[in-house]
Image: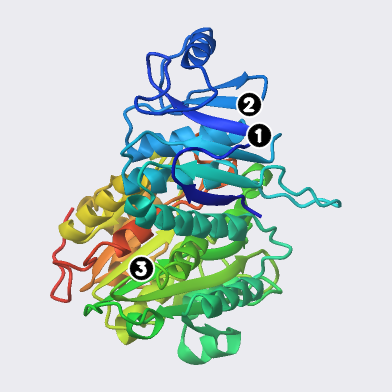
Amino acid sequence: MPPTITLTAPPPPSAAALVLPVAADGRPAAGIDLPGVDPAVIEHAVQLERWKGEAGEAVTIPLRDRLVVAVGVGSGSSQDARRAAAAAVRRLRNVTDAVAVLPPRSSGDVVGAFVEGFLLGGYRFTISKTERPETFRTLHLVVSRPPVVRRGFDYGLRVAEAVRLARDLAATPASTKTPAWLAREATRIARRSRLSVRVRDERELAAEGFGGILAVGSGSVHPPRLIELRYDPAEAAPGVDVLPGHVVLIGKGVTFDSGGLSLKTSANMVAMKTDMAGGGAVIAAMSALADLGVRVTVTGLIPAAENMPSGSALRPSDVIRHYDGTTVEVLNTDAEGRLLLADAIGYAKANLAPDVIVDLATLTGAMSRGLGRRHAGLFSTDDRLAAVLLDAAAAAGEGLWRMPFVEEYRDALDSPIADLANVAVPEKEYGAAGIVAALFLREFAEGTRFAHLDIAGPARADADEYEIVKGPTGYGVRLLIRWLTTPDPLRGLRRSPARRAG
């Protein structure tokens, strides 16, 4: 269970530990009055550590009656508040409760970001034969104007809860996390989050023509599912001023990716229980929409399958027919995520009348190699959509970089026997796998404003860093919620012919 965080006004209550923002000069941030704490003692202690006051810098100072954790506040931005909180929580694992004092006049955004950093930086997922409850249980967050920052505080709590949910879903072992299990979890989450839900099983998928989803899941004893979540603000958030428009979010839901018959190496397979991180992010983001009063209709589609090798598995050279009738020659069964997404995009276009479609997928290792582990790649057919997603990512503290649709690479997808190939044909290897994958998806989204987020890099972390912890990161949840909670997330994006942009 995550610790409880309460909002309170000065003076600070007593607790086993004190989290204290300290400026670059080594003194507690201006305007903070701490009875019983000598600022000179704090200044001397941090200066011994060659203190710079940078965000994420932390020093533990044991005093006679309490433990003090001095944290750098950096520039005072929301991003720096997240980093300071994450640094603090990692120093508090051996105490039960603490008080954190924020600088006077801190904004609601800064308070919310501090809450996010604290709850995300202290996240851990373990499976053990003995229960190991978290030692730390309660944080009292002291601010000078509790009523003024309450909204930001509540936002931070709800966003952090959603990110932790996405991490839990991705961290769950594949031995548990079959497509059916993911569908059951999504159903449970939907019911408590005031969402409607429909789950299509393998029989319904076959009857309705979801050839891509069925093909990817054909090698597994655990058949695929298509999870459809729907948020209707008029029903889920009474009193909200509802706006017209429909956002469709699609998340890749490969619950384990062996590569199929195009088998991955053992080293590359270890993290593949997290290949549904995009789907988990969509489920988690949608869980917060009603609580945060989102004003437009949102549908989440999570095509879920397990990509395994067997006698019934999809073969290289097979041709499959997608929901919209497009035929695809499969040259590599390890390029399976785009086959799932193609079905979901085709279904959304034909049945949901979306204003925009946004997908999140751990799609290509190429994107991770090109942008590293901190940034996702953004491809969009519409400049306005790209801009609002980039703005939301920056405000949420998630790295996102726009990538081009390179038209000269489109012929790499020309199959001699089908409408498309799922990867570059051998004679057209341009060394741009991430771009070619995005071009493949664009074929199915034609005529709709569309954005594809390749999150292969930031969806997983190899080590703790600020509010990110080793393992699944929950990337994309903060970005989506930040966008969808703007006063009008579809401003300038309501249905009209989409304009292609590079």
- Which of pointers 2 and 3 indicates the residue nearer the eye? 2
Q: Residues within 10 Å of mark 2 (few under 14, many from 20)?
A: some
Labelled disc at residue 16: 1
The residue beneath circle 2 is 67
The answer to whether residue 343 is above or below residue 386 is below
What percent of the width, then of the height, locates residue 308? 65, 64
What percent of the width, then of the height, locates residue 121? 55, 41
**Distance between the alpha carbons at the discs numbered 2 and 3:** 63 Å
Q: Quadrant of residue 166?
A: bottom right
As helix, strand or loop, the secondary structure at mark 3 comes to strand
As helix, strand or loop, the secondary structure at mark 2 comes to strand
- First in sequence, mark 1 or 2: give its number: 1
Labelled disc at residue 75: none
- Which of pointers 1 and 3 indicates the residue nearer the eye? 1
**Mark 1–mark 2 CB contact (< 8 Å):** yes
**Distance between the alpha carbons at the discs numbered 1 and 2:** 6 Å
As helix, strand or loop, the secondary structure at mark 1 comes to loop
The amino acid beneath tag 3 is Leu
- Asked if residue 431 shows in the view, the reply is no
The residue beneath circle 3 is 420
| Viewer-side residue, 232 vs 12 | 12
Q: Residue at x 49, y 64 (%)?
A: 284
